[in-house]
Amino acid sequence: MATLKFPEGFLWGASVSSYQVEGGIEQCDWSKEFPAGKACDYYNNYEKFFNLAQELNHNTHRLSLEWSRVEPREGEFDEQALLTYKYMLQYLHRRKIKTFVTLWHFTLPLWMEAKGGWLSPEMPQCLARYAKKCAEVLGDEADFWITINEPMIYTTMAYVLGEFPPREKSAWRAMCLVKSFPRVHGAMYDAIKEVLPQAQVGWSENYSYIESYDKNFLARTLTRIWDYIRNGWLLDRTKDKQDFLGVNYYFHDRVKFKFRYPYIFVQNVNKQVSDIGTEIYPKGLYYVLKKLSKYNKPIYITENGIADAEDKKRTRFIKDHLFWTHKAIGQGADVRGYLHWSLVDNFEWQNGFSPRFGLVKMDYETLTTTVRGSAQIYAQICSTNQLEM
Ligand code: BGC
């Protein structure tokens, strides 16, 4: 048995996002077609969930602010909602839990949707105004600010596959959207820094490990280009305004180019898949971290998790991903934290409540929680700052 020690001060914890756990959010674009109802009732019971995080030895927690709560009408801020978020962060800090605060995690207030959402020319100023207000009220209660969650996943889900609101399949719009992210992120970054010059600000992107399905030269070259579009293009355009890199890792894609446009096959090399068919490929995280090292920025793994209702694979999943993370650190990657997705089962977007990503199991009828076995093992890793393999 080997003992793998993590660097001193390593951050350990879990992530959630507002719409997926809070409950009672009815003024955003998701609430019409994909209502989340009371979800986990996190907003009213945050103490319970944060106590659980503390009992599980987490020293970090990532949550998101719900824009439609904070700014229910354009330019009108709900001071009470902002104070509630402030209390949440203070509650965590009193328990010595550091805070990652995401400003935008997939949901738009109805008024922003009516303006055209992400394709509105007003998006940079609207998100910057919101970011500035949040920075003014929350101040140092946020240790890390995440402007936008997973720009490339949002683009794909909303404008390529048409599964997220506004469910528009349009290659042209998808391209316009991708091009707009550096400007929006930049405006948010500057707005936060204006109020809090010392703040740590970045975004979380979903990086997939991509390899070529066919081994010929053309296929490999096309794969490299696709990999750059998927994982590198946006980062190269925002790197001066990323104080750290937030890494969400879930996917291993084997890319096969057929005819004139790309097909992406997620080929199961090891035949181990999650409940929703995502391949489990821990080594891909190592490749992703190694590749990101060239940016010379601190890296935080802000999401990594598995849909596993029976909790049969989660322990192995966590350990294997941490094994490869540790290896990447040993080879120079400046990884400073790991936040598992998710603290508790939650509303999994277009898939509703059935996928179970939580370290903690949620009974949505009774709103009772049960700590899963894997959460206990992860708790030992968090408290000892080391992994036994
Ligand atoms: C998203 C989460 C989501 C998770 C699991 C990530 O891409 O940021 O909101 O629940 O994946 O699918």
Image (spheres, rainbow, N blue to C red):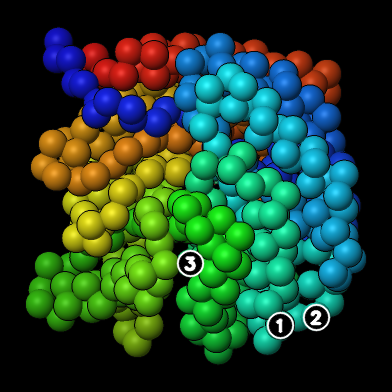
Q: Which residue is mark 1?
A: 122
The quadrant of the picture occupied by the C terminus is top left
Distance from Cα at disc 3 to Cα at disc 1: 20 Å
3 or 1: tag closer to the N-terminus:
1
Expressed as whole percent of the image width and height from the top left, the position of residue 42 reads 75, 31
Expressed as whole percent of the image width and height from the top left, the position of residue 138 reads 68, 46
Amino acid type indicated by mark 1: Glu
Find numbered disc 3 in the image and state the secondary structure of the residue it sits on.
helix
Mark 3: few/some/many CA within 10 Å (<14, 14-19, 20+):
many
1 or 2: tag closer to the N-terminus:
2
Q: Along the line of sight, which residue is nearer the eye, 144 or 378? A: 144
Amino acid type indicated by mark 2: Lys
Which image quadrant for residue 5?
A: top left
- Going 16% across and 72% down the picture, which residue do you hit? 220
Q: Along the line of sight, which residue is nearer the eye, 346 or 350? A: 346
Amino acid type indicated by mark 3: Met
Residue 243 in view of the camera: yes
Q: Along the line of sight, which residue is nearer the eye, 45 or 315? A: 45
The answer to the question of whether label 1 and label 2 lie on touching residues, with beta carbons closer than 8 A, is yes
Q: Which residue is mark 2?
A: 115
Q: Which residue is mark 3?
A: 152
- Going 83% across and 18% down the picture, which residue do you hit? 366
Find numbered disc 2 in the image and state the secondary structure of the residue it sits on.
loop
